[in-house]
Image: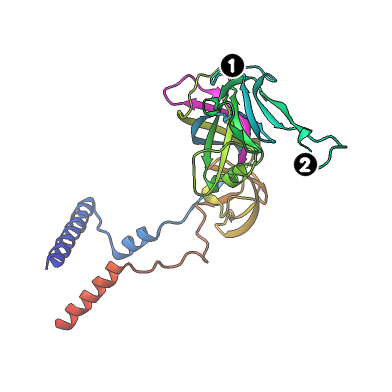
């Protein structure tokens, strides 16, 4: 019962709006006919726009997170037993300085027999791979036994990188390695240039490819850049990256809405002086999301439809919603009762 009350109210409202429109148009001297209403609803075709020369500058703005570089590990490649800690955790160290010493079984002499106890032990020292700050030594004690390949400590350089998730469809906007990348930190210092490090999927990065591990998920790739050393940032701060992915000048351009397709090739509808229309294949170049470069297939001065009509292979009626099916069922039931 409530449903029919709502339906009746909506119908009354629509009739009132239609009547108001009719009265207004009548006072202006004409009333809309059925043909006018149908024609207005069907008038969604594109308008002819002229092909011209222009500049296409592809720029992406991405949400970014600043992360501290993980640092270079100090590894006990052969394992051993810790005999000395040369530094305290948090100490500043120069590249090549000793960090930890370990004892290892001495390599037997070539003439020694198997099981000869005289082989003894030898001492090895692990050195800082880079200059920076030592971390991780708080968990290391003298006489600790290290497995081969164990990470004893890390030396961080105080450097940071910014990482941004690039949506999968925006990867088409990368025509080559990015040009200038600007980092703007939220509530931070003025924007500064951020040096490009790499662009790759999370799987590539985790398996040793360029770029650090970072937040993000789903499709797409992660873009990373090195934060300038003189820019004051902290691990985890948020910001944005403005990425220049290419620019071309004095090229043939049309609106992206006038082309079916945005990468490599596409179709446009060319309109001649007599109004005749021709579907034409074109080769495409750079796009900035509003305009797109046409490298072959169009000349300056020609006209194309904008927006281009939908490809008939994809212009199919939508399936009726469940609510629409329910309305048809109730309408048929009322007709039968009447």
Left or right for 11, reference 84: left
Does residue 180 show up?
no
Give the image location of residue 275, x and y in percent.
55, 57
- Give the camera-side residue of 335 and 185: 185
Q: Confirm whether the magenta stretch covers residue 182.
A: yes
Residues rendered magenta in the picture: 181-200
Query: In the structure shown, which secondary structural element does the residue marked by tag 1 occupy?
Result: strand
Q: CA distance from mark 2 to mark 1?
A: 43 Å
Q: Is 316 positioned to the left or the right of 212 in the image? A: left
Q: Residue at x 62, y 35 (%)?
A: 146
Residue labelled with disc 2: 115
Q: Is residue 54 above or below residue 38?
A: above
The quarter holding residue 230 reads top right
Residue 69 at x, y percent in the picture: 57, 29
For label 2, the crowd category at 10 Å Cα-Cα, with few meaning under 14, some 14 to 19 and many 20 or more, is few
The quarter of the rendered structure image containing the N terminus is: bottom left
């Amino acid at each position: 019962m409530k449903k029919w009350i709502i339906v009746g109210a909506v119908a009354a409202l629509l009739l009132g709006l239609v009547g108001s429109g009719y009265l207004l148009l009548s006072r202006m001297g004409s009333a809309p006919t059925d043909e006018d209403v149908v024609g207005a609803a069907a008038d969604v075709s594109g308008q002819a726009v002229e092909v011209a020369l222009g500049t296409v500058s592809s720029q992406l703005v991405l949400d970014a997170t600043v992360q501290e570089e993980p640092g270079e590990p100090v590894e006990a490649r052969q394992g051993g037993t810790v005999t000395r800690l040369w530094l305290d955790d948090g100490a500043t160290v120069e590249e090549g300085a000793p960090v930890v010493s370990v004892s290892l079984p001495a390599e037997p002499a070539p003439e020694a027999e198997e099981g000869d106890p005289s082989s003894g032990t030898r001492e090895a020292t692990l050195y800082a791979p880079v200059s920076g700050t030592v971390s991780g030594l708080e968990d290391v004690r003298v006489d600790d036994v290290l497995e081969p390949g164990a990470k004893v400590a890390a030396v961080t350089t105080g450097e940071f990188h910014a990482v941004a998730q690039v949506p999968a469809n925006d990867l088409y906007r990368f025509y080559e390695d990015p040009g200038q990348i600007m980092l703007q930190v939220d509530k931070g210092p003025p924007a500064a240039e951020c040096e490009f490090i790499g662009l790759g999927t999370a799987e590539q990065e985790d398996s040793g490819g360029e770029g650090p591990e970072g937040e993000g998920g789903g499709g797409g790739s992660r873009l990373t850049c090195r934060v300038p050393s003189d820019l004051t940032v902290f691990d985890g701060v948020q910001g944005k990256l403005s990425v220049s992915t290419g620019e071309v000048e004095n090229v043939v351009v049309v609106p992206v809405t006038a082309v079916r397709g945005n990468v490599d090739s596409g179709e446009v509808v060319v309109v001649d002086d007599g109004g005749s229309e021709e579907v034409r294949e074109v080769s495409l170049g750079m796009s900035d999301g509003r305009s797109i470069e046409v490298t072959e297939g169009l000349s300056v001065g020609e006209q194309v439809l904008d927006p281009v009509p939908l490809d008939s292979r994809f212009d199919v009626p939508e399936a009726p919603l469940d609510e629409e099916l329910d309305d048809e069922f109730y309408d048929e039931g009322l007709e039968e009762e009447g």
